[in-house]
Image: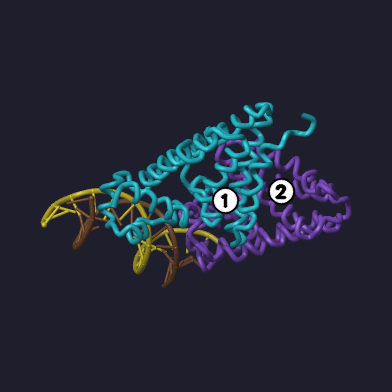
Chain colours: A cyan, B purple, C brown, D yellow
Amino acid sequence: MSKNELTVQLLCLFRQYGYEGATLSKISEVTGLGKASLYHHFPGGKEDMATAVLEYLEQGLERHILQSLRSKGSAISRFTQMCDRVSQFYEGGQQSCLFAVLLMGAHDRFQEKIQQCLNQWLTAIAEVLIEEGIQPQLAQQRAEDAILQIQGALILARGLGNPTAFQRVITRLPVELTHLPPGS
Amino acid sequence: MSKNELTVQLLCLFRQYGYEGATLSKISEVTGLGKASLYHHFPGGKEDMATAVLEYLEQGLERHILQSLRSKGSAISRFTQMCDRVSQFYEGGQQSCLFAVLLMGAHDRFQEKIQQCLNQWLTAIAEVLIEEGIQPQLAQQRAEDAILQIQGALILARGLGNPTAFQRVITRLPVELTHLPPGS
DNA sequence: GTCTATAAAAAGATAGAC
DNA sequence: GTCTATCTTTTTATAGAC
């Protein structure tokens, strides 16, 4: 198994069980690797694993999400592309966000990297809006609103056992983001 | 220490460290009670504790949030009252939602109660909107949007280490909820 | 790079005195 | 109702063979 496949499995485990809830025994069971093998790949144990998954996620954010936002088309088509990728990544609202999962845990060590990722995402969205002539401050707020709606919709989907609200949010976001502000 | 004070401390611990992250040792340390004493109050251990906290939360939801929504005033003043209480409960965006925390954990046992609480909250919001003449289906969607924005704003606040977005959401929600739909 | 075996530490849980 | 002491189980981590 490649390091990359292993990282994807770890992502899946952390999303499902949380950081503390994903025990080495469970990780060993799911991956089919013995604990000693896991420590061979990740000498620092679980913390190493979570760090690796976060780096994997940062790359995916850059390669799939941010790149959509910097592509050629109109603002609305770029946001639509972003939303498509986001929906795919969260499996239509049936998967959690690892950022949220790790933020809810007992460890502070991941907050910095998560903050960095969120800020990259926010900035990329805001830049599209600024290109559209929206004031920087408003652009930043709309970007925050977009991400916050995605995150909240994932929570609600999980809590209700029903991803409908997530799909509604994803569908309307491109239009909502690009609507001109009242009075402009 | 009364059972109620103890429950509040447990709520605080679970919000801060998550379910798995709030160990008995830490609970013992913070509450000042030995482990055996904790088992005296909660024979079922941590699961009992989380259940007690969820029940405490359900009562608080009923007594503070839902009652606001069923009070005398206009729709907008009722939503404003709800938002005031919500903001207070989450300390202006600096505290997590226990529902989200527990949903991110490894235990499935709390999902049912959480779903019940969310549905009560959703219904109470939707009922205010229906009274205002908004179509039931739209009312339900707006209620979902409100809760989802609150939840997402709490995540973003924690991720960015900055509760600004939460406060913005809380401030605009009363107006956003009561705005008439286009074409009505 | 993976395994078996084992150790060390922590977490969950209980007995019994006061 | 709380404590000390103890126990069991689980989790994390490592040594050393292949």
Upstream in the sequence, badge 2 or badge 1?
Answer: 1
Q: Is residue B152 above or below residue B129?
A: above
Seen in the image, is A179 located left or right of residue A79?
A: right
Q: Position of residue A162 (x, y in %)?
A: 60, 61
Quick check: can you spot residue B6? no
Q: Residue B15: give its label.
A: 1
Query: Local crowd at mark 2 within 10 Å, few (<14), some, or many (≥20)?
Result: some
Residue located beneath label 2 in the image? B86
Residue A103 tag number: none
| 2 and 1 marks in contact (CB < 8 Å) | no
Q: Nearer the viewer, mark 2 or mark 1?
A: 2
Residue A14: image location, x then y, percent: 44, 52
Q: Amino acid at mark 2?
A: Val
Determine the residue positioned at 38% across, 53% down.
A9
Q: Residue furthest front?
A: A73
**Residue sitting nearer the eye, A183 or B32:** A183
Which quarter of the rendered picture does the C terminus of chain A lie within?
A: top right
Q: Nearer the viewer, residue B52 or C15?
A: B52
At horizontal 80% and vertical 46% (from top left) the residue drawn is B80
Helix, strand or loop for disc 2: helix
Q: Position of residue A165 (x, y in %)?
A: 64, 55
Estimate the x, y position of residue B136 in percent, counting from the top left. Answer: 79, 60
The amino acid at mark 1 is Arg
